[in-house]
Image: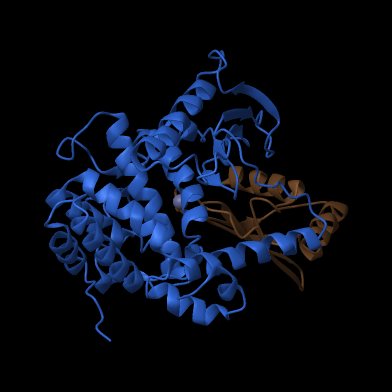
């Protein structure tokens, strides 16, 4: 599976980009894709300096896009970002 | 004359026009209507709402224990003795210094003017390179140790985040484009002023840097931002110092941390002419007079009106209006005559 991740905003305002490919089990991928499609809670309009996480996952012909903020980023996606950011 | 009751049935675009002319009750109605809308939306979605309660402006320090959660374990609160954790003690001390600066200098009773408790979360996440304000409390990461360290230990970071809270309650500047850049600007302004007070520096001794103490030796730069020379603090620093280089892209909520360099430079130049204390008062009163959708031109109109009023009242230097006019002109901002 290919991934493209952009983390922007934050107090430092230094964007981070991660791009690459990773082998994952079918069930793990499905779990991530489901999180991408899940309805997010309403945005907190008072967030200042929080990070914004833009993610794109490409699995064969399927493409999944999502954007999260600090308060609605699901833990498995946070862990996925931590894993791929260490690969760099 | 716009009475309080009248304002609530006036459409937002009219409130905005009246607020631009300095009508403070319309400004308040405009800002409050947005806040009520947000809270109502949250309630309607059945989410837990933390109500703002009048308090004593007490400090509460929570340890997130490296989870991405807030209010995990209370480790120190107002009046407690120091703990074993130096980060907790530092967050306690610096948040108290910032709270007291606003109280002693401007008579502002804590972040919201109503004694809101000052809540800090430390050790948030793992190797987390950030600090943020979430609407009612502050949260700090430890940094990855490679490029950044301990965000909660830096007075300018703490003052910057707490000032976002002050802005939320005084003018509620929305967080995108020019109002967002002004929001960031006010946080950098009070971050810088309070850092200089904390370090007992005068303006010629000060470095005018933001975030210099949270970057490591390996970080490619000396700080995150420079008020004196925007765009020069590090390899990634793309802040302009003049409207000619204004960022028009979509990143970073349309450049809130980028275009803030323009008013930041104007603030620095103003301080050189009339001193940081007069500027602090003028900027604080301007923040009170601004409104949610204010742009750079509104900022200039408002700050000149405020400087004029404070000069007449004998509270700031007679040359304030001229100094601010020159400083904003230096960064490419002049008043638009209608
Ligand atoms: Zn900020």
Which residue occupies 54% across, 23% down?
B88
Can you say whether B318 is above or below B245 in the image? Answer: above
Counting from the top left corner in percent of width and height, residue A29 is at: 81, 56
Counting from the top left corner in percent of width and height, residue B301 is at: 29, 71
Can residue B268 be seen here? The reply is yes
Give the side of residue B164 with respect to residue A78, left or right.
left
State the blue chain.
Answer: B
Can residue B221 be seen here? The reply is no
Give the side of residue A59 with respect to residue B5, left or right.
right
Snapshot quadrant of residue B81:
top right
Disc tally is 0
Give the side of residue A27 with respect to residue B101, left or right.
right
Task: Chain A: give its colour.
Answer: brown
* Outermost residue to the right: A27
Counting from the top left corner in percent of width and height, residue B305 is at: 27, 66
Camera-side residue: B54 or A2?
Answer: B54
Which quadrant is the N terminus of chain A positioned in? bottom right
């Amino acid at each position: 599976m290919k991934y493209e991740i952009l983390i922007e905003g934050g107090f430092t305002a230094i964007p981070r980009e991660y791009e690459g490919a990773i082998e994952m089990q079918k069930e793990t991928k499905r779990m991530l894709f489901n999180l991408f499609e899940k309805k997010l809670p309403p945005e907190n309009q008072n967030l200042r300096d929080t990070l914004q996480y833009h993610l794109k996952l490409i699995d064969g012909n399927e493409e999944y896009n999502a954007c999260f903020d600090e308060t609605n980023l699901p833990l498995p996606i946070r862990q996925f970002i931590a894993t791929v950011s260490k690969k760099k | 004359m716009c009475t309080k009751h009248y304002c609530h049935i006036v459409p937002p675009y009219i409130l905005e026009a009246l607020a631009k002319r300095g009508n403070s009750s319309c400004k308040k109605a405009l800002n409050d209507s947005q806040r009520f809308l947000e809270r109502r939306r949250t309630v309607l979605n059945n989410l837990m709402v933390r109500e703002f309660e009048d308090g004593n402006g007490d400090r509460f320090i929570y340890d997130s224990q490296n989870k991405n959660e807030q209010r995990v374990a209370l480790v120190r609160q107002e009046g407690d003795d120091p703990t074993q954790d130096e980060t907790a003690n530092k967050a306690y001390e610096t948040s108290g210094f910032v709270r007291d600066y606003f109280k002693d200098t401007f008579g502002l009773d804590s972040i919201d003017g109503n004694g809101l408790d000052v809540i800090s979360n430390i050790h948030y996440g793992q190797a987390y390179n950030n600090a943020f304000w979430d609407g009612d409390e502050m949260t700090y990461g430890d940094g990855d140790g490679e490029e950044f360290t301990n965000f909660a230990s830096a007075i300018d970071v703490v003052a910057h985040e707490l000032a976002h809270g002050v802005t939320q309650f005084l003018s509620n500047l929305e967080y995108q484009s020019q109002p967002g850049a002004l929001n960031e600007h006010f946080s950098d302004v009070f971050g810088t002023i309070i850092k200089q007070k904390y370090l007992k520096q005068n303006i010629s001794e000060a470095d005018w840097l933001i975030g210099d103490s949270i970057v490591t030796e390996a970080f490619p730069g000396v700080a995150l931002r420079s008020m004196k020379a925007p765009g020069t603090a590090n390899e990634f620093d793309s802040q302009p110092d003049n409207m000619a280089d204004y960022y028009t892209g979509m990143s970073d909520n349309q450049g809130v941390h980028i275009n803030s360099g323009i008013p930041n430079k104007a603030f620095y130049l103003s301080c050189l002419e009339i001193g940081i204390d007069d500027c602090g008062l003028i900027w604080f009163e301007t923040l009170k007079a601004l409104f949610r959708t204010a742009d750079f031109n509104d900022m200039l109109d408002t700050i000149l009106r405020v400087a004029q009023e404070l000069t007449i009242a004998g509270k700031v230097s007679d040359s304030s209006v001229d100094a601010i006019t020159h400083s904003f002109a230096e960064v490419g901002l002049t008043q638009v005559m209608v």
